[in-house]
Image: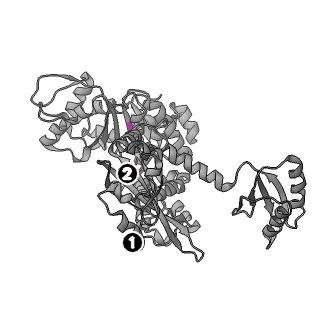
Amino acid sequence: MRLEINCQDRLGIAQDILDILVEHEINLRGIEIDEMGKIFLNFPNMEFPELQHLMPKIRKIDGIKDVKTTPFMPIEREQYQLQTLLKTLPDPVFSVNTKGRIILINDAVLSQLSLPQEMVVNVPIGDLLKGFNVSRWLESENPQAQVQKIRFLEQDYLVDMLPVMVPDIGGQSIMAGAVFLLKSEYRLGQQLTAFNQGSADNFVSIQADSKAMKNVIKDAKRMAELDESIMMFGETGTGKQLLAKACHEGSRNRDGKFIVVDCRILAGKEASLEFFGENDEKLGLLDLANRGTLFLDEVADLPSDIQTKFLKILQSGYYQRAGESVSRPLEVRIISTTQKDLGALVQKGSFSEDLFYRLNVLSLFLPPLRERKSDIIALAERFIKQHSMKLGRQTPRLTKACMDYLHTYPWPGNIRQLENTLYRSISLLEGNEIDKIHIQLPSCSATSSIVSQEFNGSLEDEVKRFEKEILMRLYPSFPSSRQLAKRLGLSHTAVANKLRDYGINKKTVKII
């Protein structure tokens, strides 16, 4: 029989309850008081009439609010939950006292030792775990949680060694023992495989509270299921590669590799061999990406000779390594990114027009962070949690002043700048709060990042560039000059002329 008593915090109230139990000659098995001030009693079962007589007496005590039966004591629930967790863990777990003697093990240990529990309990942990001096660690002045490589039953394991600390009356913690959680190479391999598999929602890791980013994710999910090439436009640090990886994991090529190519570092003959491969001596990037996804980062910088060869491959569906006459079929999804105006580069002749159309079948525009304000704090808190875990420290919180500062800063470096800034702050932080003073950022006006850092033309040139960027971004959602004119509050004729001047149409921007 167990009772839950809801009462006030009054000196002597527990003694008043115990006096009634003595009066009824009830043998008390256990008593608990939780953080909320509730008192729990555990005593032998009694007949219902006797219980009906007992409970009103307890209710009459000054400060008692309610008395009711409960199926279990809080400590019983915790014990059974821990026992269930321990029992079902597939990895070996040991718990030891401060002398290093085993006091608790799980079924995985017993299964591997093929011994009854009584033959394992009270055995020194050092008799079973070899390769590390556990006793010295337990006896050290302030043992910290750590990971070590050990041997158990002639096999290598990684062991998480976790000290068990019990709070003392004076606020200090006293070590009461330790827990050892073992991971085999096979189990680690299983977990890494599961970790690298695509999730049910491949886009869940992308922060999208803002309307602008929700629209991007909505379009990206639909495009991921198609086979056509995707061109991603956006400033540096906006998360284009992360979005491309999510599209790959949501495509039918998800079982293939996701190969990243930084087109800015490709140059010369070696670059061509790197891209296309050579005989049987060297696999090229196309070999590696076949039946997967080839991610061309900053495709505007792809050398012209590679552009020509690559276009022929995309047109024919076959490729050849250098020095070979054998044609190999190519089945690859192409996702490209650019910060530059590819249309202008096509007009100048520095980028292949046909290749541009091959790569820009589907288009995605990633908004800069300054245009998705409602994502900033959520992103910041996510980065703080991630980096705090990596650094093995308690997750600090952002003060209101710091949140306001992060929210109003224009972030010319976008998400990458936000993450790097917070990582630096966490690394040097001594307390558990990140305030504005802990954030080191260059002064930057809210509009400074609208103009390209490479800007060297006239004001008219820059206005046209910005105007084209807006039209390119809106066109997939408003794919007619009348719809777009209504959205922008302009005349149909004015918008139609601008679309024609900038070469924006259903051929250059695929609508799905």
Residue 506 falls inside the magenta stretch: no
Whether label 1 touches label 2, CB < 8 Å: no
What x and y, as percent, mark residue 13?
81, 69
**Which residue is depicted at the point 42% across and 63% down?**
100
Q: Label for residue 348?
A: none
Horizontal relation, residue 411 to residue 170: left or right: left
**Which residue is depicted at the point 77% across and 56% down?**
4
For marks 1 and 2, the one nearer the N-term is 1
- Which stretch appears magenta? 231-237
Work out whether residue 199 or residue 500 is closer to the camera in this orientation and state it: 199
Q: Quadrant of residue 275?
A: top left
Q: Secondary structure at mark 1?
A: loop
Q: Which of labels 1 and 2 is toward the front?
A: 1
Work out whether residue 68 or residue 284 is closer to the camera in this orientation and state it: 68
The answer for how far apart the CA atoms under marks 1 and 2 are is 49 Å
The colouring scheme, among rainbow, by chain, secondary structure or one colour, is one colour
**Residue 162 position (above or below residue 195):** below
Q: Which amino acid type is shown beneath numbered disc 2?
A: Thr
Q: Which amino acid type is shown beneath numbered disc 1?
A: Ser
**Which residue is depicted at the point 83% across and 56% down?**
67
Mark 1 surroundings: few (<14), some (14-19) or many (≥20) residues within 10 A:
few
Residue 503 visible, this orientation: no
Q: Secondary structure at mark 2?
A: loop
Q: Label for residue 140?
A: 1
Q: Residue extending furthest bottom?
A: 170
What x and y, as percent, mark residue 177?
47, 64
What x and y, as percent, mark residue 375?
53, 52
Q: Label for residue 236?
A: 2
Residue 327 visible, this orientation: yes
